[in-house]
Amino acid sequence: MTREEAIIRMQDIGCYNPDVVDRAEWKDGKVTLRTSDGKSFEFTSDSRLDDYIKADDVKAVVIGQRFFSPEILSLELSEGFDFGSGKITVLTSKNCIVKAVSAMLNELRATGCGICTFCREGGYQLSGIVDAMTKPGADKKQLDLALEIAGAMTTSCNCPVGEDTALPVLTALDLFRSEFEAHCGKGKCPSGECPAFSTLYIDPYKCEGNGDCMDVCPEDAIEGKPGFISMLDEYECTKCGKCIEVCENGAIQFATGRLPKLPERLTKVGRFRK
Ligand code: SF4
Ligand code: SF4
């Protein structure tokens, strides 16, 4: 059965709404794509994505619902290439693959109609499993379980929504398994993007002691006074990120390994020495 026939059949039995499946369609050798920041561009057959998208430090490219390695940017793509939803997202070394998959699953499973059990339950389970991997405590067995559920969804869901929901897990795990294993077995997020695996600190060389961070911290986790380097209490901090947003000096940062040497008491700005 073709995708089109499947769509007609699902419409007939009332459990598939084609409007929720976003597809970039080729027409006369062209297809309209969009980047994650909402800019759209017309891609012509046999051109390359890097003719349109300029990016450095690329770790992965997400096209529609599928993950690709960076080489996809420089390949000529012919008419008929499946761009899925047509959304292109470039991930760099600062982006976490597991976190990206978790965010996609939350979005995708919300598009299902809920009637088909494999899509509804599979999406719910996958989302929970991958979300748990962004926090300490997940083990490697979860990787095989996620693959098993996602594999079953591609063959057993009633319509393309279920298959789309499984694709990020299948493609990301195929290409970036070591990053998943770092989260599950070793309790590390290599990119430092998962807050649960990292610690926040204030860079004593960047802080200008204006206290903006203290004003927004809901936990009262930052100590300081005007003109002094602020100090962050990692045990009180919930990593909500509010202080990062207001610090215009970029002084509040995540560390994934050992913290650098920091002041042990309030120190005047410019006076801290290692
Ligand atoms: S960490 Fe940033 S916001 Fe906080 S006092 Fe220092 S410069 Fe100001
Ligand atoms: S991340 Fe949130 S809780 Fe932690 S210091 Fe910043 S504002 Fe306070």
Image (cartoon, helix red, strand yellow):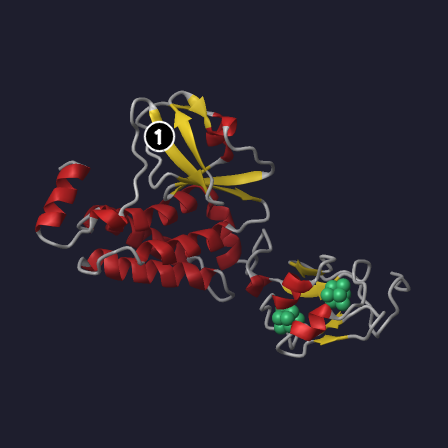
Residue in front for this viewpoint, 158 or 251: 251
Horizontal side of 39 relative to 232 (left or right) equals left
Q: Give the residue at x 67% y 79%.
A: 220
Q: Is residue 274 left or right of residue 234?
A: right
Q: What element carries label 1?
A: strand
For the residue carrying disc 1, how many other residues have a C-alpha within 10 Å: few (<14), some (14-19), or many (20+)?
A: some
Camera-side residue of 165 and 143: 165
Q: Does the closest atom of ligand 2 sit within 8 Å of the Cβ of label 1?
A: no
Q: Is residue 37 above or below residue 51?
A: below
Q: Quadrant of ligand 1?
A: bottom right
What amino acid type is highlighted by mark number 1? Answer: Val
The location of residue 123, given as percent across then percent down, is 30, 58
Say which residue label 1 marks: 31
Q: How many marks?
A: 1
Q: Measuring 69% from the left and 74% from the top, which residue is drawn there?
A: 215
Q: Quadrant of the N terminus?
A: top left
Q: In which quadrant of the rendered view does residue 46 lie?
A: top left
Q: Where is residue 210 in the image (x, y as percent from the top left)?
A: 78, 68
x 12%, y 43%: residue = 8
Judge from the rendering whether residue 155 lies leftward or rightward of residue 26; answer left or right: left
On the rendered image, what quadrant is the C terminus found in? Answer: bottom right
x, y percentage for residue 16?
A: 17, 51
Residue placed furthest toward the left: 12
- Residue 268 image position (x, y, % from top left): 88, 69
Q: In the picture, residue 143 is in which quadrant?
A: bottom left
In the image, what residue occupies the spot 91% across and 64% down? 271
Tell me if residue 47 comes above or below residue 242 in the rendering: above
Instruction: Looking at the picture, tell me which residue is in the foreground, 216 or 229.
Output: 216
Farthest residue to the bottom: give it: 220
